[in-house]
Image (cartoon, rainbow, N blue to C red):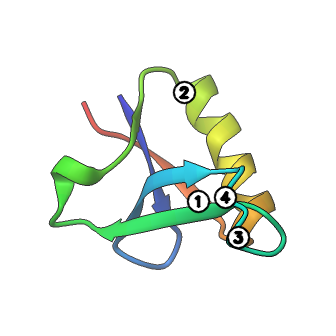
Amino acid sequence: MYALRISGSNDYVSKIDKNDTRCFPPGRVDVVPSFKAWAIKRYPTKVGAERAAKLVGKLEGFHCTIEFMG
């Protein structure tokens, strides 16, 4: 399983909503601190995590590090 960590912080991506219309431009990324491990979004493949990292960069401008969670 892989997770996305916001580079330079201890925060991880917990939710990606590319259709959230409450934001302009549409899309939102929620993050949680590392001690809330139960809320971290996990991806079964590295390819899926890479795609999600590109989407996070597009929506919020965050650079993400892909980490293997075991």
Image x and y of residue 63, in percent: 66, 66
Residue 15, how many percent across, how many down? 47, 52
17, 34: nearer the viewer: 17
* Cα gap from disc 3 to disc 2, whole angstroms: 21 Å
Q: Earlier in the sequence, mark 4 or mark 1?
A: 4
Asked if 62 appears above or below 1 in the picture, the reply is: below
Q: Secondary structure at mark 2?
A: helix
Residue type at tag 1: Cys
Give the mark, 4 or 2, whose residue is nearer the N terminus: 4
Mark 3 lies on residue: 60
Mark 4 Cα-neighbour bin, 10 Å: few <14, some 14–19, many ≥20: few
Please tell me which of labels 4 and 3 falls first in the chain: 4
Alpha-carbon neighbours of circle 1 within 10 Å: few (<14), some, or many (≥20)? many
Which of disc 2 and disc 1 is earlier in sequence?
2
Find residue 47 and report its image quarter.
top right
Compute the Cα span from label 4 to label 3: 13 Å
The reply, left or right, for residue 51 in relation to residue 40 is right
Circle number at residue 46? 2
Who is closer to the viewer here, 46 or 60?
A: 60
The correct choice, above or below, for 53 with respect to 20 in the image is above
* Image-based side of 28 in relation to 4, left or right: right
Q: Which one is in front in this view, the residue at disc 4 or the one at disc 3?
A: 4
Per the image, the residue denoted by label 4 is: 20
